[in-house]
Amino acid sequence: MSRAHGSWRPLLDHLRPHRGLLALGGALTLAGSLAGLAMPLLAKTAVEAFGAQRSPAGPLLGLTVVVLAAGALAGALGRYVLERMGEGIVYRARRDLVDRMLRLPVCEVDRLKPGDLLSRVTSDTTLLRAVFTDGIVESVTAVFMLVGAVVMMALMDGPLLLVTVGVLVLVGGLVGLVMPRIRRASVQAQESVGEMGAALDRVLQAFRTVKAAGAEQREIDAVAGAARRARDRGVAVAWWTSVAGTASWGAAQLTFVAVLGVGGARVASGALQVSSLVAFLLYLFYLVAPIAQLLQGLTRVQGGLAALSRIREIEDLPAEETSPAGPGGTDRVQAAPVGVRFENVAFGYGGGRPPAHHEVSFAVPAGGVTALVGPSGAGKSTVFALLERFYERQGGEISVDGRDIRQWRPFELRAALGYVEQDAPVLDGTLRQNLVLAAPHASDEAIGRVLRLTRLEELVARLPAGLDSEVGHRGVTLSGGERQRVAIARALLRRPRLLLLDEATSQLDAVNELLLREVIAEVSSETTVLVIAHRLSTVAGADQIVVMEGGRVRATGTHADLLGTDDLYRELAATQFLAARPA
């Protein structure tokens, strides 16, 4: 953990924009504390009045009630102001954290686990709320009470104050030793909660697969194991917190005994009045609560520092620049198609895996259809990942529209591209919301156009609320082919200059595959289409086919050309009955 993460500076950075509320809340809290500190003085006056056989009932009791009511009101208002400040800080932290997460490069998100990211936004920021709504409030109140009580005790009797301070120093030393352990245990506990969230997210993302495989118990055991580790580390936090609390309580009892013994001796010698001893003991009791409160507040702060360190890990990651205006509409005139060139491109995902690209070179002319084919693991999907700049090439050159891809800002580049992923994700929400994800201002006319192109009009007519029908989590109410066509329609609605289709026919039947081929042929007249396909029937009519194997380009040509010149392509075609199997 860096020094910045382990210090109080990140917490102070969160507090800085709320200095006004902190000052107001602190002032009100101080007023409530001062009212509380006045009570022992009022008690001392009452004891002296009794000793002088004067009745304290009347004005003195009335003053006591007024002081109590004013102190309670000021304390309540102070706590409200500070808690409101804390909620504002947590809101801003969550907003900034989500903002950062959604701007992270794909390569960074791929390295992390979705469940752990979710835990940082929910669980960790909840701990942060506890710091500012409880930890800071309790600590500020406790410090005011502690300092005020010590000052008043000093005015009462110096020797008794020295006895009290001696014990407080002992407590402070013990707490100082324990707090770093609480912070370390809190970090480990939060990491365990993130691991549990990641394990549960893994199951929920493949819920049907787990059910179909009868693997429920194994996955339950895996999640339970993560939960058990979170429990064990939470118990460690509770243990060290208990040690600190016990030390504090024991010190308070020891202080009381010491002050009572020394104070009794001073009363017996005539050096101290009984009323002053009573007031001093009352202030001593006032010290017990602030010490415990301060200890609890510091414990919460330790947990907050642990949570903040995990939040800062995300905030410190590099973020991509996004368009200040957001996605645009689709009623503009479509720009001209773009060409693409790969020249000696090298790339590897790392982690001990073999390189995905070895000096890959090919050119895609502007307009028309170019297909990437080859066995699994050939590096086809990596072409799309590099074009979208989800990952950066490690060698060679990639150009789009004659410009090196690194000269494009990511949001400008992606605005020119339409990307249909292999699993065609559909988000929870309505069909309309899914269609306009990249073009929120699209007109009904533009939506109607892509619905006709992708043959989705029948689906819209069948849904109970048409375009405004809910499609369910991950589009569960739609068939696989419908989800794929929705993803294609979403990409087309953006009117891209380059359309990337990754296995766009993998979940389509023969009839819908034929319809999609017609769609590809139609849109290729106004945009460049680059398609990855295992079904060669989808791309047999492509203007150009690039054959890849083992991260290299082995051949380029038309379907007819490749049947005569490339053994791998001929074998692929033969297995799909598009050519005679070679002897």
Image (cartoon, rainbow, N blue to C red):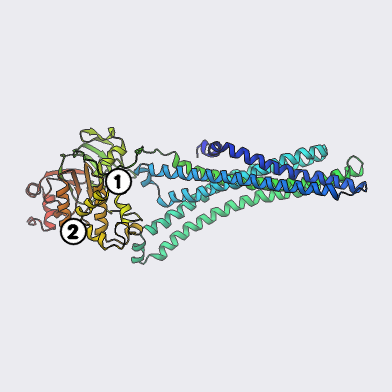
Q: Which residue is mark 2?
A: 512
- Name which quarter of the figure residue 25 lies in: top right
- The CA distance from mark 2 to mark 1 is 25 Å
| Residue drawn at point x = 18 percent, y = 59 percent | 512
Q: Is residue 132 left or right of residue 383?
A: right
Q: Is residue 188 above or below residue 214?
A: above
Residue 83 in view (yes/no) = yes
Of 300 and 84, nearer the camera is 84
Foreground pick, 411 / 470: 470
The disc, 2 or 1, on the residue closer to the chain's N-terminal end is 1
The residue beneath circle 1 is 439
User: From the viewer's perspective, is residue 123 above or below residue 156?
Assistant: below
Mark 2 residue type: Asn
Label 2 vs label 1, nearer the camera = 1
Q: Position of residue 521 (x, y in %)?
A: 14, 49
- x, y percentage for residue 285? 76, 48
Instruction: Label 1: state its secondary structure.
Output: loop
Q: Is residue 183 left or right of residue 343?
A: right
